[in-house]
Amino acid sequence: MLGNGVVGILSESSNKWERRVPLTPSHCARLLHGGKDKTGISRIIVQPSTKRIHHDALYQDVGCEISDDLSDCGLILGIKQPKIEMILPDKAYAFFSHTHKAQKENMPLLDKILAERGSLYDYELIVGEHGARLLAFGKFAGRAGLVDFLHGLGLRYLSLGYSTPFLSLGESYMYSSLAAAKAAVISVGEEIASQGLPAGICPLVFVFTGSGNVSLGAQEVFKLLPHSFVDPNKLPELFKMGKDVSQPARASNRVFQVYGCVVTCQDMVQNKDSTKPFDKADYYAHPEHYNPIFHERIAPYASVIVNCMYWEKRFPRLLSNEQLQELMRKGCPLVGLCDITCDIGGSLECVNQTTSIDSPFFRYDPCNNSYSQDLEGSGLICSSVDILPTEFAKEASQHFGDILSEFVGYLASTIDIKQLPSHLRRACIAHRGVLTSLYEYIPRMLKSDTEEISENPENSQSNKKKYNILVSLSGHLFDKFLINEALDIIEAAGGSFHLVKCQVGQSSKAMSYSELEVGADDKAVLDQIIDSLTSIAKPNENNGFLDNQTNKLSLIIGKVQEMETEKENRTTERKTGVLILGAGRVCQPAAKLLASIGTNSSPQWYKTFLQDDSEELNDVHVIVASLYLKDAEETIEGIPNATAVQLDVQDHVSLFNYISQVEVVISLLPPSCHIIVANACLELKRHLVTASYVDNSVSMLDEKAKDAGITILGEMGLDPGIDHMMAMKMINQAHVRKGKIRSFNSYCGGLPSPAAANNPLAYKFSWNPAGAIRAGRNPATYKSNGKIIHVDGEDLYDSAERLRIPDLPAFALECLPNRNSLVYGDLYGIANEASTIFRGTLRYEGFGEIMGTLARIGLFNTEHHPLLKDGKRPTFRALLLELLKINDDGCLKREEDIAERIFRLGYCKEKLTAVKAAKTIIFLGLNEETEVHVSCQSAFDVSCLRMEERLAYSSTEQDMVLLHHEVEVDFPGDQQHTEKHIATLLEFGKTENGNTITAMALTVGIPAAIGALLILGNKIKTRGVLRPILPEVYVPALDILQAYGFKLIEKTE
């Protein structure tokens, strides 16, 4: 039967609420309609079920058979463990079996499969290239868990005498879809934003533990509310401000939003030796070296604790009952515990029971250590539902099936597991009634006492030998069969072992981790075991050490490597590399941010938004490459973990050499160079980030990038970049609420700060003006009230229109159309609904009329001018007189004369404009008697030279960046209405240690660096050529930008 291409789908029997399916009808349709030759599947038989999220008829409609009899199936799929009596002989099964950790309670199921000569694939063991599980429901647990808890929060606050918007929210399963549940949360958020929360419960702080998928899912729901994230070390300040009645403005502000705080293990414990910083690797190996601090530094300020972090008994608890009791005695605002991990008796000691979907809460009173099933009375409400993802059964099943359907054909059509792809072969626990080699350890570990040791080794039931030691084995235990070799060594020497923990990493790159309590009656025998275990590890003096005080051994076992540094031998940690090409102004903030990532120096926002709590944080080493080595060296001055190199991208050998040393390349080179870099990245399979527009040459690399398994992320700067991200957030949020975009207006500009706008143009350049002047000659197209408007390049400056931003009344601005706005209608998915689509460039008012006048005078003409040919060096004044058609050198010496001449020649329509143009000409020194530089061959060259000299920023002046979106949204339904959504970014240049970093460099360089970090952290999983318009890019990127310190202001009118 194995490999016959016939797939069965079980009727779930573990829980009345389990409505998920491994494959939806649409997945089955694709598999069946594709044909067995292509998909490996010929038939799908579905056991009938009246509670499954997709009804039997839907499966029948796409060609599935409905039958209780699965005897014809070679592969049978489920979600949860089936009943033992449902196991049939000579079949392959795939479900979450929970058998690979050798837990006694799951062994009868494994024994039954072995007895029936069956095969078993465990979804939990199917992992991808980077060791991450492919089939998991973590985010759905987080989403459902928080929606449910917000529902309970409304009920709990009502019992405490507070009416809140949360009261209108239902539980997750009550909504027809995840989108409907999110819309309901958004509605709650709108009520908070407009009517606020009772002051007595504010600041309302949600503390999220961990940063894995469960936490991310919960945060995804939280972010639908008006919110701000707070660093853990800022909680006391927030709490003090929120309770300070003498600050009415601040008090008012806090009432209209909620606060989030993401904490990881370093916020929960500290080294007992106060001179030592937190070290995650050391904490995981020696938790006994650390004291808990969560109850002192985080919990006193939390209203709700959302527990999303994996925990083991060897680690300190997050909160003990005694700590809770003390917190409540001191007036802690904690109102509830949302334990999405559902870890009974685990990190939250008071969570001693699971709850059900239909009864999700119990009440715990720390004062008298009592439990109740109602929400009335003193204490905390607690939720610990162990089957949360099924509340969003439709979306969870779709997500699961999207991934499973990619390889289920292999499982259904393969007879010999040696023919399977490695990631599936490693997930096979048993084949034809025999445990596969990777899992031969299971029965051997069952022979040991698998009950977890107590916190006091002397009281452990397994502590039967005279001498005992805790051995932590981590490394490639199973792919190199080292676990079996380790057990052989222990048993052959006459020792015993007790399994404390086993965590299997099932990819060639993933580490596995096991803890054994090893014992012997003779100290010499125990020493021999340790020596032998060390011999199969990497031989070096630091591989293992005996701690006489704790009597515990920490031993890291890995593949033999030739590198001899202590750090690399002690851990698997290595430096992650990023290559930045180009050492201009934008490079420095990007390099500084990237180089700050490391075990001890990472900013808090990295740990909050990017660090996966299951992995150790690696340092990021930055290589800055420039055509001129001096430029690169100046850029990295004072930046740790950075190296400067000389590189010409036309030198392919050198380019390939440096790209091969890193994981991600950031190209800050001119756009014409990106294709060279992109092709090198494709060949070397390295990711690429740029801040430039994605042109046709790069766009055509999409399929090649997908085939190479790399991401080419373009337009990750300011404009383009942050503008995309802010726009897509607004548009997608509107679409989630069934809104239709009526108009989209976007404005962006790099400007001098008001104090630095001290010249007639009210404009300055932080680099060569040529590019900005040329941009002012580009044609533009946009849509206004359904009409397509074209603006010729020569008319662009004259098309500038006055603009005022109500929230920034001090800025007198104007905007010029920016190229082709219509392409953004397609890019943003609003082309068919928005009657207005406009993107403009911001300048201070008057800029356009002056520049347009200068252009008509001829100061921006790029043709070679006769006065500047053959090395001639006329004066600036001589060139001006020539352009203004004056032969008499004695004329036009005064500003009024120049203005009058400009007006008479018809270069402007208003005399006031002529005066402004004349002031600009004089300010730029274009009427001076000094000679023009010999390098200038056109009036354009002369103007650029003068602007670069006269319109430069001084060392004490600041620039600024202003980005402003206005989106009008029509909402249908019984209460039709229109909303105006506004988002604004205002950022000023900064001076640090006497060095000025421009706002433009920050707002271009920081997003590019964030793009690289998102790729390094595997937060961006999509491959190909991308822009930051995907939620997996813009959602975390915008959060990080705000956490970094960018001022992103959003409001709705």
Image (tube, helix red, strand yellow):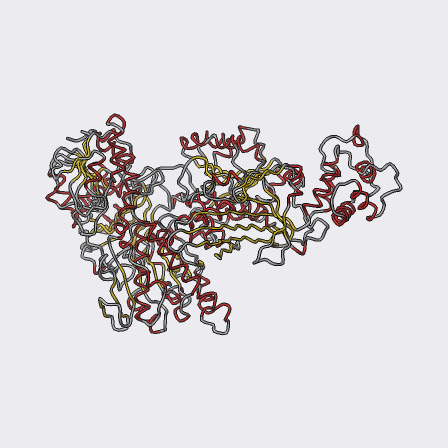
Position of residue 714 measured from the top left corner of the image (x, y, whole percent): 50, 38
Residue at (44%, 67%) from the top-left corner?
239
Position of residue 107 measured from the top left corner of the image (x, y, whole percent): 15, 46
Q: Is residue 264 visible?
A: no
Position of residue 749 measured from the top left corner of the image (x, y, whole percent): 60, 47
Q: Is residue 649 visible?
A: yes
- Name the foreground residue: 81 vs 909: 909
- Name the foreground residue: 17 vs 504: 17
Residue at (24%, 38%) from the top-left corner?
25
Up/down of 395 relative to 428, above or below: below
Up/down of 38 relative to 817, above or below: above
In the shown orientation, is residue 235 left or right of residue 762? left
In the shown orientation, is residue 915 left or right of residue 575? right
Position of residue 270 measured from the top left corner of the image (x, y, whole percent): 39, 60
Give the quarter of the image for residue 943.
top right
- Image quarter in which the N terminus is found: top left
